[in-house]
Image: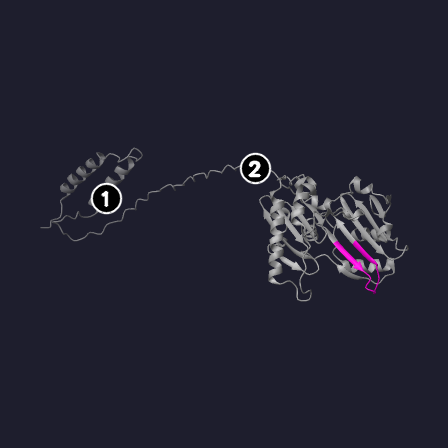
Amino acid sequence: MNEELTADERAAMRSRIVGGARDIKPAGAHRNAWIAGSIAAALVVAITGGVVATSTLSAPQIANTPSPALTATVAPVVSTPTPTPTPTPTPTSTPTPTPPPVPSTPVVAFNGDCGQMLSDADLSELLIGGPGRLYTEPGLGTNVEDSLALLGGLSCIWIGNQDSISVVVAAPSAVAPDLQASMASVTCSVDRGCATGRVVADVWIGALVSARAGDYDAGFTQEEVSAASARLDRVISRVAAKPHASPVASFGSVHADGWVLSDCVALKGRLEGITGLSLEIRVAPGTYPTPTRPVESLLMSSAGVSTCEFREPAYGSREMIEVTLMPGASAPPASALAVAGTSETSVPGADRAWVHADPSRGYSTDLVAVVGDNRLLVRRFTGSPSGTDADKIAAAVLESLR
């Protein structure tokens, strides 16, 4: 049933609502009391200006004057960013530079003494026809030992009545891999003999024995190679069994920058201008390693030694020039400089120089020039007394190195 409220009923309703609104308490400590009063006022206006709808009343709607909507102003919440911690830089340690390796002092096998390598008793067994003698080449050109010593090496040659034995030893670390590989098996040459080399314990041993092929043109047969191989094994085994200090190589000074003969062709032109000869190149850098020349191969592949050798090709000519650079070899020992026929001379571009002339070998001249720790050797063979131009050749070589 829908009935319109009387004036008294509306007054009573208003009184109850306003009283109830006054009893409303804020929901939180931060809410103001004016919210409750505003709610009550809005309800009174709604009752006095219209009808109250209930679930059981559906009286006709009465036009109401809309009351202004309540607008709650909400202060913007500004989030305070969490400060990002600044990472503390980790101190970077400055690497300590690695100092260059200090050149080791070379230790020469067998104390540089061929007599400690093989004794006379050994040679009596190894050489055909007797113990033979130790071969020493005359002149200043004998001092390949100074370059070998940088490799902990020693070279010895014994000549018997019918054959010869040549042995060279060095620190294994000083022997270039290609030379070790080329000498691992026995190699024979009709001009040189048979050779092989290998590492035994703490030393590399290269050996060369003279051998003849039954047929020079055909070369060595397998039986002849096998016989030479057996001799080489005996030589190497006997040398390895001798007491010796472990050889030590020094690589600190054997490769001086620029101290190398790299262009024999250009040098040939210079020498032809000095000597007036027409020359051909016999030996040039890169010729080695040659297994049947173990000493030269070791010097050139490991000790930095470089050689250009020239000769006059005319039939019967004895004209020959050999130029060798030996980095790190320094001056020849006093014993070599004391040989009769040796005297000090001067060469442009050299710190010191010595010349050796040996009339017993024909017109042959050896000249050694030293620049710092490096040595130049000029060997001049000529058929006349006029071939005394070794000093000019040496000066031209030194000039080409600058």
Q: Which of label 1 and label 2 is nearer to you?
A: 2
Secondary structure type for disc 2: loop
Instruction: Answer above or below: position of 190 versus 104.
Output: below
User: Visible in this render: residue 25?
Assistant: yes
Question: Viewer-proximal residue, 48 or 27?
Answer: 27
Q: Which mark is residue 238?
A: none
Q: Which mark is residue 45?
A: 1
Question: What x and y, as percent, mark residue 40?
Answer: 23, 39
Residue 165 inside the magenta-drawn segment:
no
Instruction: Answer above or below: position of 312 versus 104.
Output: below
Question: How busy is the neighbourhood of tag 1: few (under 14 within 10 Å), some, or many (20 plus)?
Answer: some
- Give me the residue at 65% from left, 49% from top: 126
Query: Label 1 is placed on what type of residue?
Result: Val
Tag 2 residue: 93
- Give me the residue at 77% from left, 57% from top: 309
Q: Which residues are magenta?
A: 307-322
Spatial CA distance of label 1 from label 2 is: 83 Å
Quadrant in which residue 153 is drawn = top right
Extreme residue toward the bottom, this view = 217
